[in-house]
Image (cartoon, rainbow, N blue to C red):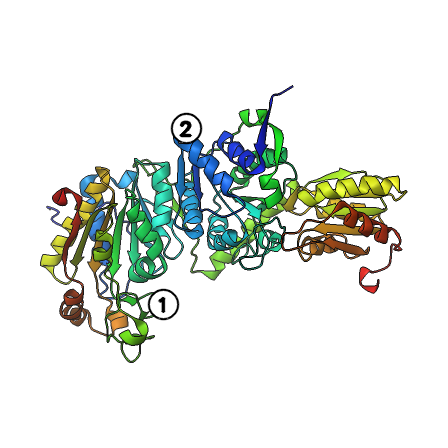
Amino acid sequence: MAEKVLMKGNEAIAEAAIMAGCRHFFGYPITPQTEISAYMAKRMPKIGGTFLQAESELAAINMVYGAAAAGARAMTSSSSPGIALKSEGLSFLAACDLPSVIVNIQRGGPGLGGIRPSQSDYFHATRSTGHGDFHMIVLAPNTVQEMFDLTLEAFDLADKYRMPAMILGDGMLGQVMEPVDISRGNNIKTYEKDWALTGTKGLRKRNVVNSLYLSAEELEVLNFQRFEKYKEVEKIARTENCLLEDAEVVVVAYGICARIAKNAIDTARQNGIKAGLIRPVTLWPYPKHQLKAAAEKAKAFVVVEMSMGQMIEDVELSIRCSRPVLLCNRTGGMVPTREAVLESIEKAALLKGEQNADSI
Amino acid sequence: MQIVFEKPKALSDTPTHYCPGCTHGIIHRLVAEVLDELDITGKTIGIAPVGCAVIHFNYFECDVAQAAHGRAPAVATGLKRVNPDNIVFSYQGDGDLAAIGTNETIHAAARGENITVIFVNNAIYGMTGGQMAPTTLPGQITQTSPYGRDTKTAGFPLRMCELLATLDGTAYAERVAVDCVKNILKVKKAIKKAFQYQIEGKGFSIVEILSSCPTNWGLEPVKALEWLRQNMIPYYPLGVFKDKEVSR
C-alpha cells in the first residue's frame, strides 16, 4: 500500500501542481486559499521554480498568460473576489488556447462577502467566466485526495485540449486535513508545444499568441472551431454515483456538499426511502447525460449546494424539467447539515414524479 | 548595384496600418535595427499592447504575445521567468502603460524585472479616436477634453520616467523624441542601450519616446512634430533619468 501524507486541501493542490511539472506559480494573498501560495513560496525556490507574489490578481493571471505562452505549466490560485478580477485573463487564455490551471477556493459573496466556505461562484466558473464565447474545464474535488488527483488531471486536460482548467473548491476543502496518497503524481505525461513563444532561433516562422481578429468573418470561424473542440471535451463529463441503481430520490451535490449528502442518503435508506447520489466531478462539461439517464427512474431530485441555487439550473436543464427538483441550500458561508438534506429527501419522497416543484 | 539602404531583417514585408505621418513606423524601424545589430531577433519575444501597435506582431519577425490592455509588463514577466535567456520587450502607448497598466508597469520596474519597455508617448489615445490620455498636456484639446484638459477636474499628466527613476529596480530610464533626425539618432541609441542592459541582466529598462499623432491632434505631420517640440518637450524634458551604471 502506498504511503499516505497528511495534508491540508490547499497544500494537496500545491504539491500536485509541483508533481505535475508546474514550475511557475503567480499568486496574490486572499483567504481561504493562502496556504497554496505559502506552500509554493517554500517549495519553488528549492526546485528551480518561480514563485511570484504579484501586485494584483490581474497581474497574476497575466503572468500565467505569459508563462503559458512560453509553453510552461503555470498556475494561479485565488478565492472568489480575486477570481472575479482574473476574469479578463481567463477570457484571454481561452481565446489564445493557452493551457493553464486556475484554483478557486470559494468563499461567501457577493462583494467582499465573508471568508467561510461557499459554492456561489458556480455561475462564474461555468457560465460567465469572462467576456466572449468560451468555456474552461471545471473540476470539483470533494476530498483532499481529490484536490490532489484532480489538480494532476487539470494540468493534463489543459495541455491536452489547450484550454484553461479550473479547480473549484471551497474554504472547507481547502482547510481540512486528510491523508493523501501522492504516488499518482509520479506518472506525468507531457505534451509537445510547437506553438509556444520560445524565440524563432532563426529556424522557424514567428509564433504569435493573439486574440485580436478585426475580421468578423475570421473570428466567427475561430469561435466555431473552438466549440467543435468543446464537443470533444464534453466527453470527459463524469460523476461519482452512490446507491443510484434503484434510487427514487436522486440527490445531486458536488464538493463538500456531496459528502454531507452521502451521509444523508444512508440515513434515508435506513428510513426506507430509496435515495441515491449523483456527484458531478466535472462541472464543465456538465454530466447532463448522466443526469438525464437518472431521471428515467427517479421520481424527484434534490440539489444540495452552498449558494442561492446555481447548479440547480443545470440539473433542471439536464433533465428537461421532467421531474420536480428541490433545493436544499445554505449561503453566505454556511454549510448544510445532514439533517437538512435528509428533510429535503423526505419531502421529495412524498412527491409524485410528474409534479412540478413550482406547484408544491 | 550597391545597396545603401534597406529594410531591417527584423521587420516583415507587411505594409503597416499606421496613419500617414505617424511616427510608429520610425520607432518600429529603430527597434528592428537594434534587433538586427545585436543579432537577437531569434531569441526575442515582443509583447503587443492594446493601442495603435496592437497588431505589431504582423511587423516584427520575432515571436510575439498580444497582451490585454495594460498587462504587457505582467505578460512579459511570465515569459521572462520561464525562459530567462529570451529577450523580452513590450511596446506600449501612454494609455496602456500610464493609465490602465500603471500598476503592472510600476511593479515590473520595482521587481527589477529584466525586460525592456518601449513606451510611445503621444499624449492621446490614438486607436480609439483621440481621447484624453494620462499624458495629455494641461489645456490640450481631445475628444474627451473638448475645452482643453482642465487640471482642476482631470488632474495632471504623469511623467513616467521621473516616477520610475525613483525605483531601485529600474536600471535604465531615458526620455527621447522622434521630432527630428538628430533626436531620432538618440532614440536608436537609447533603444540599443535598453536592450543591451537586458542582455547584461541589469534589470528593468524603459525608453519613453515622445511621439506625434497627426490624425488625432488634427495637425499636418510636420506641424505635429513642431507641436511636439514646442509643447511636449518642455513638459516632458528629454534625458536620462536613471542609469544604474552611472549612478554607481
Q: Provide the secondary structure element on which disc 1 rests.
A: loop
- Frontmost residue, A137 versus A258: A258
Residue kind at label 1, given as amino acid type: Thr
Residue kind at label 2, given as amino acid type: Ile
The disc placed on residue B128 is 1
Q: Provide the secondary structure element on which disc 2 rests.
A: helix
Left or right: A253 in relation to B79: right
- Frontmost residue, A308 versus A191: A308
The image position of residue B106, as x and y in percent, is: 30, 52
Q: How many numbered marks appear?
A: 2
Determine the residue positioned at 61% across, 38% down: A176
Viewer-nearest of discs 2 and 1: 2
Mark 2 to mark 1: distance in Å? 46 Å
Number of other residues with Cα within 10 Å of mark 2, as a class: few under 14, some 14 to 19, many 20 or more? few
Residue with the mark numbered 2? A47
Q: Chain of mark 2?
A: A
Q: Looking at this rendering, what residue extends furthest in the bottom direction?
A: B147
The image position of residue A295, as x and y in percent, is: 81, 49
The image position of residue A233, as x and y in percent, is: 61, 43
Question: Image height check: is B198 above or below B29?
Answer: above
Residue B14 shows in this picture:
no
